[in-house]
């Protein structure tokens, strides 16, 4: 029986398919960061504390990343178009739920449902693209797809500032509804239906790994208020360890595991997941701290904050393009090391922040430099993995890298939120917590550079596997 990954030809031609699916993917990637600038306003209107605001960010990326490989398997089993429509419908409905939320609990639940919808939509959309385009056209199509991932997260912060300052923070979510409905209406006309294949789905594995990461994040966030030695911190962290162990047991026992242990144990996969985890954690961690610092301490409006992020968006885009060129010439290892060194230097410059100094002179230069460094790290993570993995394991390896792209963001925000807790408490005006969080980012990037020196495979990639975490 044919699957959705067999060559098919879209009824309306390939490029309308690409435009439509890239629009949907852009919506998903933007939603990773679009709430960052709106957080202070959301917190004030819904009376949310630091812990709740952290979950507003992390719940989406947690569900998106934790269920993404499962979403890919579901697309194989049920058909890519069917899974795509289900994910898009859920994401659109959940966006409406978030916009209408009158409490933190409803908003966080809506963010989780958005993440589930994204986990179904994204791998199904990529499966349609890879089956629609072939040869050089596929390379160009994947290049466009990679560009969406490289710039969407950064531009989301700018969009969040514009919407929050204009019609209000609820439109950060409402804007997805007409876009989602438009894509839902157009998909049946341009994306051909193709049968799936009967396949065992590793539902237990997907649930266990997502639960494990949720417990890990809960423990990290709780530590900011209760302390590292409290039962509220230690019990969730211990539960996370047990669930990760259980995940390994489940994957070894099921016939069609979500993630094969043999693939996860390969050095290129370990290297790629490490680089992706750190790069995304640093990016979203710096976004989180900077947005709250600018609005809480410096008194910036949501629009002013979004505009300050514009050079950061440009820097990430330039870094991603630069990384793609450098990897082919120098290889992945020096690019990874250099990326984290530049990121560490940028984060260290950001620690010069002061309520009495101009944010454009203290925060922005280091922020842009750190963003420039993070861009090539994204490319390195995907490229060095996909170029050193046997062809039969490409799909699983790509899914694992994409999973850690989202989970890295969740963990990064949780960690910096905990370290900066003293400055994020209601009524706090001190910047000690922000400086501590930025210092941690600098140290983490420096350690990542040292680890990459020995972990990232040497040599130049054999093929053109250049892209952002969502590129392949």
Image (cartoon, grey):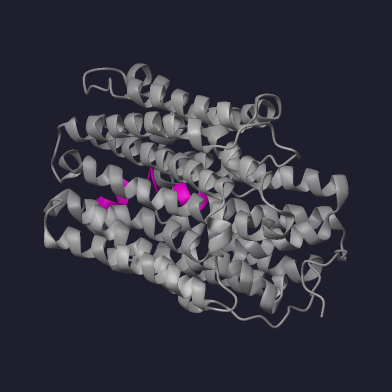
Say whether residue 85 is visible: no
Of residues 325 and 385, the one drawn nearer to the viewer in this rendering: 385
Above or below for 403 versus 253: above
In-image side of 71 versus 145 (left or right): left
Q: Is residue 367 above or below residue 169?
A: above
Residue 38 on the magenta segment: yes
Q: Nearer the viewer, residue 305 or 8?
A: 8
Q: Residue at x 46, y 78 (%)?
A: 204
Picture coordinates of residue 34, whole percent (x, y): 46, 48
**Which stretch is magenta?**
30-44
Q: Which image quarter: residue 241?
A: bottom left
In x, y percent, where is residue 377?
A: 54, 35
In this image, 215 relative to 155: left or right?
left
- The residue at 49%/33% (across/down) is 454
Q: Position of residue 337 (x, y in %)?
A: 50, 28
Look at 57% across and 32% down and name the residue there: 376
Q: Nearer the viewer, residue 194 or 35?
A: 194
* The quadrant where residue 185 appears: bottom right
Residue 250 is covered by the magenta coloring: no
Quarter of the image with the N terminus is: bottom right
What secondary structure is the stretch in magenta mostly built from? helix
Q: Residue sitting at 67 percent across and 59 percent down?
A: 395
Question: Looking at the picture, how far across and down is residue 100, in whole percent?
Answer: 39, 66
Q: Nearer the viewer, residue 320 or 357?
A: 320
């Amino acid at each position: 029986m044919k699957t959705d990954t067999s060559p098919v030809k879209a009824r309306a031609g390939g490029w309308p398919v690409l435009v439509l699916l890239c629009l949907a993917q852009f919506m998903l990637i933007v939603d990773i960061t679009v709430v960052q600038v709106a957080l202070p306003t959301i917190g004030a209107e819904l009376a949310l504390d630091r812990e709740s605001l952290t979950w507003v960010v992390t719940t989406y990326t947690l569900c998106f990343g934790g269920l993404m490989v499962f979403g890919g398997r579901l697309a194989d089993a049920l058909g890519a178009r069917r899974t795509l429509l289900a994910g898009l419908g859920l994401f659109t409905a959940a966006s409406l739920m978030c916009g209408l939320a009158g409490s933190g609990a409803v908003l966080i639940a809506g963010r989780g449902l958005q993440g589930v919808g994204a986990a179904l939509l994204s791998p199904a959309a990529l499966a349609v693209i890879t089956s629609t385009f072939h040869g050089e056209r596929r390379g160009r199509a994947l290049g466009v797809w990679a560009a969406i991932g490289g710039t969407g997260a950064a531009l989301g912060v700018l969009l969040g500032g514009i919407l929050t300052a204009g019609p209000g923070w609820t439109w950060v979510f409402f804007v997805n509804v007409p876009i989602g409905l438009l894509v839902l209406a157009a998909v049946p006309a341009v994306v051909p239906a193709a049968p799936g294949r009967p396949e065992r789905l590793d539902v237990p594995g997907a649930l266990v790994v997502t639960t494990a990461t949720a417990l890990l994040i809960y423990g990290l966030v709780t530590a900011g208020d209760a302390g590292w030695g409290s039962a509220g911190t230690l019990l969730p962290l211990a539960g996370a360890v047990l669930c990760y162990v259980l995940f390994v047991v489940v994957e070894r026992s099921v016939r069609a595991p979500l993630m094969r242990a043999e693939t996860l144990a390969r050095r290129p996969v370990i290297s790629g997941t490490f680089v992706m985890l750190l790069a995304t954690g640093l990016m979203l961690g710096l976004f989180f701290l900077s947005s709250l610092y600018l609005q809480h301490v410096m008194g910036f409006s949501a629009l002013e904050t979004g505009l300050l992020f514009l050079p950061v968006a440009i820097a990430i885009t330039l870094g991603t393009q630069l990384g793609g060129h450098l990897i082919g010439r120098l290889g992945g290892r020096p690019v990874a090391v250099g990326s984290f060194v530049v990121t560490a230097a940028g984060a260290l410059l950001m620690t010069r922040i002061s309520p009495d100094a101009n944010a454009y002179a203290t925060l922005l230069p280091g922020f842009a430099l750190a963003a420039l460094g993070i861009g090539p790290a994204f490319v390195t993570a995907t490229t060095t993995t996909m170029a050193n993995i046997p062809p039969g394991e490409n799909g699983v390896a790509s899914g694992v890298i994409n999973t850690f792209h989202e989970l890295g963001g969740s963990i990064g925000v949780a960690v910096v939120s905990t370290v900066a807790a003293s400055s994020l408490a209601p009524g706090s005006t001190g910047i000690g917590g922000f400086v501590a969080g930025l210092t941690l980012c600098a140290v983490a990037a420096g350690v990542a550079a040292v680890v990459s020196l020995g972990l990232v495979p040497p040599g130049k990639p054999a093929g053109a596997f250049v892209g952002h975490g969502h590129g392949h």
